[in-house]
Amino acid sequence: MRTSVYRPPTPDDAVEEQEDQEKQPTLQEIINIKLIESGEKERLMELLRERLIECGWKDEMKALCRAFIKKKGSNNVTVDDLVHVITPKGRASIPDSVKADLLQRIRSFLVQAAV
C-alpha cells in the first residue's frame, strides 16, 4: 500500500486496513476458542447446569414460565414470547455464589492456559 504525503488515503486503503483489523480475533474470541478446544467450556456448562438445579433456579424459571403461560393462555404464547419475558429475570436471579464460582474457574483456566 503506497500513500502520499500530499493526499489522504483513498477509501480503498481505509477498507483494506479495516479488513485487516477485522481478521484479528479479539481476546474474547481467543479465550472462547481455547475453552472449546480444551473441552473446558463443556465442563463449565455442565457445572453451571448442576449448580442452577441445586439452588432451585431451574424450578423457579419453570414456575415463571408456567405462570406466564397461564396468564396469557397456552394458545397465545410462543417460545419467543417466553424467552423475551423470562431471560432478563433468569439472568438477574442467578445466585452470586454461582457466578463467583464460575468466574473463579474461568480465571484459573486462563492462568493455566497462559492466555
Image: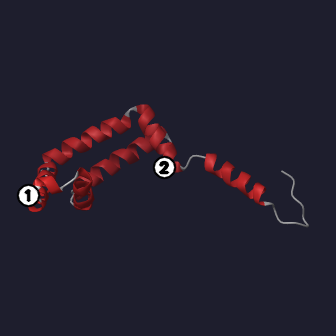
Label 1's element? helix
83 over 110 or under it: above or below: below
Residue 115 visible in the displayed image = no
Pinpoint residue 57: horizontal percent, then vertical percent. Answer: 16, 52
**Front residue (pair 101, 42):** 42
**Front residue (pair 105, 60):** 60
Q: Residue at x 73, y 51 (%)?
A: 16
Q: Is residue 19 left or right of residue 100?
A: right
Q: Is residue 41 left or right of residue 15?
A: left
Q: Residue furthest top?
A: 38
Location of residue 64 by image quarter: bottom left
Pinpoint residue 17: horizontal percent, then vertical percent. Answer: 72, 53
Cα gap from disc 2 to disc 1, whole angstroms: 40 Å
Name the amino acid type tagged 2.
Answer: Gln
Classify 10 Å Cα crowding around label 2: few (below 14), some (14-19), many (20 and above). few
Q: Residue at x 27, y 59 (%)?
A: 84
Name the amino acid type tagged 1.
Answer: Lys
Q: Which residue is mark 1?
A: 70
